[in-house]
Amino acid sequence: MTAFERLLLANKAWAKEKVQEDPGFFKRLASQQSPKFLWIGCSDSRVPANEITGTDPGEIFVQRNIANMVVHTDLNLLSVLEYAVHHLKVEHIIVCGHYGCGGVKAALSHQNLGILNKWLRNIKDVYRIHEEELTALDEDKQLDRLIELNVEEQVLNLAKTSIVQKAWKHRQGPHLHGWVYSLANGILKTVSNIPPGARLESIYEFNDL
């Protein structure tokens, strides 16, 4: 049996188990989607949103990319954000990074990684903003701290969008959260928290939303 065939077999077993536990599970799931959470996470296979939060399909709307970035030219991210905020009306947006992130580690290096350079440069900008704090740390602590700071900056990037600011004005939501997941013990750590309507530096605030 090949690796992909094992996945299909496991899927059948999972679906059967779900129906045994809750006969109406798939009927309910197919009829509507009303998650309270948007999860912007890292593509790393070790950080599955549903599993580490103990939630079922349908509870979290998920967008993942390398190093859990919120980049204002990323139409994929912005489309997901628009849909989640204004159509699904999620109540919370979580940016979740993780310690040991390969993307952040690569951004700390001077290695030429081809097309990845363009994406990782956004993390290098986070390093530049916080360089004084980071250079005072040893190598391991520097990586962990940059991972935390990167999450904080991405949460702030969410708040800078007109998408989020419009929702704050009209429905007093969503709440923005920054978390970091530990691969070593499976625990999530809160590093950032921005409630609806929080004031930003005035240059980032939009009028007439």
Image (cartoon, rainbow, N blue to C red):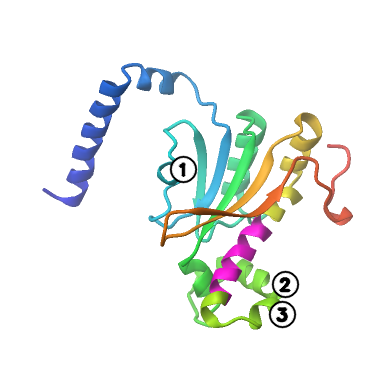
Q: In this rendering, does residue 118 appear at all?
A: no
Q: Quadrant of the C terminus?
A: top right
Label 3 to label 1, Cα distance in Å? Answer: 34 Å
Q: Is residue 106 above or below residue 15?
A: below
Q: What residue is rendered at 31% in x and 17% in y?
A: 23
Q: What residue is rendered at 58% in x and 41% in y?
A: 80
Mark 2 or mark 3, whichever is nearer to me: 3
Mark 2 or mark 1, whichever is nearer to me: 1
CB atoms at circles 3 and 1 under 8 Å apart? no
Q: Where does the image place residue 185, in percent across and percent down from the top left? A: 42, 58
- Label disc, if present, on residue 53 of the rendered structure: 1
Amino acid type indicated by mark 1: Thr
Label 2 to label 1, Cα distance in Å? Answer: 31 Å
Q: What residue is rendered at 66% in x and 83% in y?
A: 136
Q: Which residue is mark 2?
A: 129
Amino acid type indicated by mark 3: Glu
Q: Where does the image place residue 32, in percent across and percent down from the top left? A: 49, 21
Start-end of magenta stretch: 142-154
